[in-house]
């Protein structure tokens, strides 16, 4: 675990390419995105990393009850530290890092309050595991290959289906829903202790079928909780009952990755195709933030930081609201990118 550095090391890190509260490349004022009541000032490369850590693909982001921001990333090959979880305070000061075991596979990140304690649920696409952990990285339990599911039984030749979990959602009763986004496109449901309940979804384009259920969230805005799934390979959002029955589709996001819901009912959807979408409580599009979807974003994501355009997104992969309504966005770019959208 990497802890806060000395003043000299901190100043050295602050002088590196990731500079807290930097202006855009021309040195001018930070860009403001959105319209009307949904306007945000963008600070790209938010948070001062210690010199020992270099981001890989930044995949997940969440805020804890104290306002700390957690970034889950795959770790750059040149990084001295292999910690995949980086924690900042609300002002972007480095707090701690941990999670060497997630290097290369760090993906989904979900935070949940249980009583007076909060826990993280982390997906590792490389090792094929979901881990429940404390905020400092101590493992509570882990879920591996869904051997109990008939959908994952080996074929006649003994070959197993691919399994690579991308994200989780948790029901009010504690049931855990795991999206096998990079594997076989099923959703596997477990109880709060990790006991298998059921499997639903599966590959296809029809209602109830999925193609890369990349992200999930438990939508509790109405009287009945609804499991909402980023059915990314099918270019849609799909909604299910908690026992896996199809409800309907939500349009407006061609490459949805995941979700977060603010207390006023707004939903933020990071769209891999170079934009961040805001939906209202009726799941209607409010606006697209930082839209650069007509660009060559698939090529740009592989380039160095100086090729990124201020006020535009490249490949948004994860996003969350903080308690003030600001939005943090992390992107699937090789050098990692964390953007704070401060509500104005």
Image: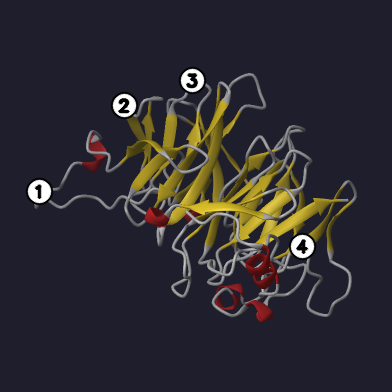
Residue on which the image places disc 3: 173
Q: Which class describes the residues within 10 Å of circle 2: few (<14), some (14-19), or many (20+)?
A: few
Residue on which the image places disc 4: 43
Query: In the rendered structure, which disc, 3 or 2, sits on the residue that comes first in sequence?
Result: 3
Q: Label for residue 195?
A: 2
Using the image as rendered, state which of residue 79 and residue 11 is in the foreground.
11
Q: Which class describes the residues within 10 Å of circle 3: few (<14), some (14-19), or many (20+)?
A: few
Residue on which the image places disc 1: 156
User: Residue 287 location in percent, x, y?
Assistant: 78, 52
Q: Which residue is found at the position 88% from the left and 74% from the top?
A: 28
Q: Which class describes the residues within 10 Å of circle 1: few (<14), some (14-19), or many (20+)?
A: few
- Between disc 4 and disc 3, the foreground one is 4
Q: CA distance from mark 1 to mark 4?
A: 54 Å
Q: In the image, 9: left or right of 79?
A: right
Residue furthest left as drawn: 157
Q: CA distance from mark 3 to mark 2?
A: 13 Å
User: Residue 14 location in percent, x, y?
Assistant: 70, 69
Mark 3 and mark 2 in contact? Answer it, CB < 8 Å.
no
Q: Secondary structure at mark 3?
A: loop
Q: Secondary structure at mark 1?
A: loop
Using the image as rendered, state which of residue 211 and residue 143 is in the foreground.
143
Q: In the image, 315: left or right of 232?
A: right
Residue 229 in view of the camera = no
Query: In the rendered structure, which disc, 4 or 3, sits on the residue that comes first in sequence?
Result: 4
Which of the 4 quarters of the picture holds residue 152? top left
Q: CA distance from mark 1 to mark 3?
A: 38 Å
């Amino acid at each position: 675990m990497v802890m806060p550095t000395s003043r000299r090391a901190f100043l050295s890190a602050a002088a590196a390419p990731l500079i807290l509260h930097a202006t855009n490349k021309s040195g001018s004022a930070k860009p403001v995105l959105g319209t009307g009541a949904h306007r945000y000032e963008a600070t790209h490369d938010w948070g001062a990393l210690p010199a020992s850590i270099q981001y890989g693909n930044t995949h997940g982001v969440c805020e804890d009850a104290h306002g700390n921001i957690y970034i889950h990333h795959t770790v750059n090959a040149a990084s001295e530290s292999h910690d995949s979880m980086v924690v900042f305070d609300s002002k972007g000061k480095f707090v701690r890092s941990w999670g060497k075991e997630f290097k290369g596979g760090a993906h989904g990140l979900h935070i949940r309050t249980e009583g007076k304690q909060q826990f993280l649920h982390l997906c590792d696409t490389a090792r094929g595991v979901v881990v429940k952990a404390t905020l400092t990285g101590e493992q509570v339990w882990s879920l591996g290959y869904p051997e109990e599911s008939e959908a994952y039984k080996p074929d006649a030749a003994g070959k197993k289906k691919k399994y690579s979990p991308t994200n989780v959602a948790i029901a009010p009763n504690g049931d855990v829903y795991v999206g096998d986004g990079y594997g076989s496109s099923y959703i596997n449901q477990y109880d709060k202790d990790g006991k298998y309940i059921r499997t639903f979804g599966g590959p296809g384009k029809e209602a109830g079928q999925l193609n890369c259920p990349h992200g999930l969230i438990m939508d509790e805005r109405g009287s009945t909780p609804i499991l909402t799934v980023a059915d990314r390979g099918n270019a849609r959002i799909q909604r299910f009952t908690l026992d896996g029955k199809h409800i309907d589709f939500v349009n407006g996001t061609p490459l949805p990755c995941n979700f977060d819901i603010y207390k006023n009912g707004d939903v933020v959807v990071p769209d891999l195709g170079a934009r961040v979408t805001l939906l209202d409580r009726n799941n209607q599009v409010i606006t697209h933030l930082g839209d650069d979807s007509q660009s060559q974003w698939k090529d740009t994501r592989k380039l160095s930081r100086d090729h990124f355009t201020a006020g535009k997104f490249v490949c948004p992969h994860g996003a969350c609201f903080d308690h003030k309504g600001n939005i943090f966005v992390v992107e699937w770019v090789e050098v990692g990118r964390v953007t704070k959208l401060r509500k104005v």
